[in-house]
Image (cartoon, helix red, strand yellow):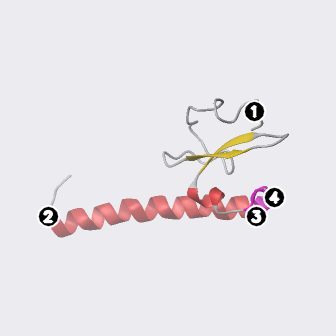
Amino acid sequence: MRVDDPDKDRLEQPEECDGCGFRTIELERYLSYGPGSQVEWLCPYCHNTQAEIRKDPVVKAVINIAHMLEKQVNEHTNEILHSWLGVKR
């Protein structure tokens, strides 16, 4: 998102990534200076993808799939750990 002053604008983290739109708590703030100064809040997947490529619908789909897989792995890892430790929910 274009801003007037990247150091002072958009300090509050939004609910979703500016790149893929996925709602996650792990967003980082990235700044670009110049005539078109921008502040972007990006997830790790979008941060590692170049801005031009990130706009491609196929790449967006792959990023969303990565988010869904990560969520599933985290949920199942917790279930497995609870069963190994004998903890009841």
User: Of tags 4 and 2, which is closer to the observer?
Assistant: 4
Rendered image quadrant of residue 58 = bottom right
Report the residue marked by disc 1.
Answer: 3
Report the residue marked by disc 2.
Answer: 86
Front residue of 8/84: it is 8
User: Of tags 1 and 3, which is closer to the observer?
Assistant: 1
Q: Which residue lies furthest to the left in this view?
A: 86
Amino acid type, label 4:
Glu
**Coordinates of residue 38 in the picture (x, y in percent):** 74, 41
Mark positioned earlier in the residue sequence (2 or 3): 3
Mark positioned earlier in the residue sequence (2 or 1): 1
Tell whether position 53 is magenta.
yes
Left of 33 or right of it: where is 15? left
**Coordinates of residue 87 in the picture (x, y in percent):** 16, 58
42 w.r.t. 6: above or below: below
Amino acid type, label 3:
Val
At x 56%, y 45%, the residue is: 23
Front residue of 46/32: it is 32
Crowding at mark 1 (Cα within 10 Å: few <14, some 14-19, many 20+): some
Report the residue marked by disc 3.
Answer: 58
Q: What element carries label 2?
A: loop
User: Of tags 2 and 3, which is closer to the observer?
Assistant: 3
User: Of tags 2 and 1, which is closer to the observer?
Assistant: 1
Which mark is drawn over residue 52?
4
Give the CA distance from mark 2 to mark 1: 52 Å
Q: Are marks 4 and 2 in contact (CB under 8 Å)?
A: no
Tell whether position 71 is magenta.
no
Left of 18 or right of it: where is 83? left
Left of 74 or right of it: where is 46? right
